[in-house]
Amino acid sequence: MAGQTDEVDRIVGAWSTQRPDLDFSPLEVLSRVDRLSRHLDRARREAFRRSELEPWEWDVLSALRRAGEPFQLSPKQLLQQTLVSSGTMTNRIDRLVGRRLVRREADPDDGRSVLVTLTEEGRTRVDAAITRLVDAEALLLAALSRTDRERLAGLLRKLSLGFDG
């Protein structure tokens, strides 16, 4: 889309005029990523809201749903997937049990341990939320062809491996 400019172009242009000694190419990329992140955050919050879920509830429920039948994980496995503290996870599980979105069950392999299992209501909510989320995210990427999406995904993967690895 040659010839088109956005707010980042205007900001970088102004900085380049004021500080021609600096290379502003990182801002050209990461300021756009930041702006897109805000749009994504809004779209996600709306998808979760429409499914009557908080973002933290989504994190736990989606981890259970992705686990496949019987949609259960240990609290330790949930901790690893959601990157929160043990106390926070206990609180989250308690609240989700209270909303009847998950239930605690004795681990048949270890009577001292429990498993957290997605209830039918929890599965209905998380399935509705993921459908809404995929639709909302597709709209955010509508200006890109499938090839452009794949290229961008590859570049972002390459960048994020430096942080996640």
Image: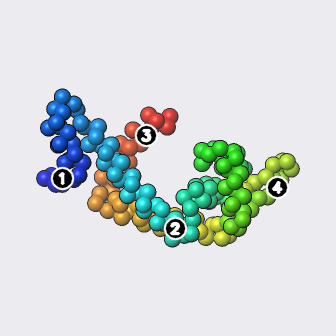
Q: CA distance from mark 4 to mark 2?
A: 31 Å
**Residue bearing mark 4:** 106
Q: Residue at x 75, y 54 (%)?
A: 115
Looking at marks 4 and 1 on the same chain, the residue that comes earlier in the sequence is marked by 1
**Which label sits in the foreground, 2 or 3?**
2
Q: CA distance from mark 2 to mark 3?
A: 28 Å
**Residue bearing mark 2:** 49
**Residue bearing mark 1:** 5
Looking at marks 2 and 1 on the same chain, the residue that comes earlier in the sequence is marked by 1
Disc 3 on helix, strand or loop? Answer: helix
| The N terminus, quarter of image | bottom left
Looking at marks 2 and 3 on the same chain, the residue that comes earlier in the sequence is marked by 2
Q: Position of residue 95 (x, y in %)?
A: 69, 60
Horizontal placement of 47 versus 38: left or right?
Answer: right
**Which label sits in the foreground, 4 or 2?**
2
Q: Residue at x 67, y 50 (%)?
A: 89
Disc 4 on helix, strand or loop? Answer: strand
Residue sitting nearer the eye, 114 or 147: 114
Kind of residue at badge 1: Thr
Label at residue 160: 3
Q: Residue at x 21, y 42 (%)?
A: 12
Q: CA distance from mark 3 to mark 4?
A: 38 Å
Kind of residue at badge 4: Ala
The reply to whether residue 138 is visible in this rendering is yes
Looking at marks 4 and 2 on the same chain, the residue that comes earlier in the sequence is marked by 2
Horizontal placement of 154 versus 124: left or right?
Answer: left
Looking at marks 3 and 1 on the same chain, the residue that comes earlier in the sequence is marked by 1
The reply to whether residue 66 is visible in this rendering is no
Disc 1 on helix, strand or loop? Answer: loop
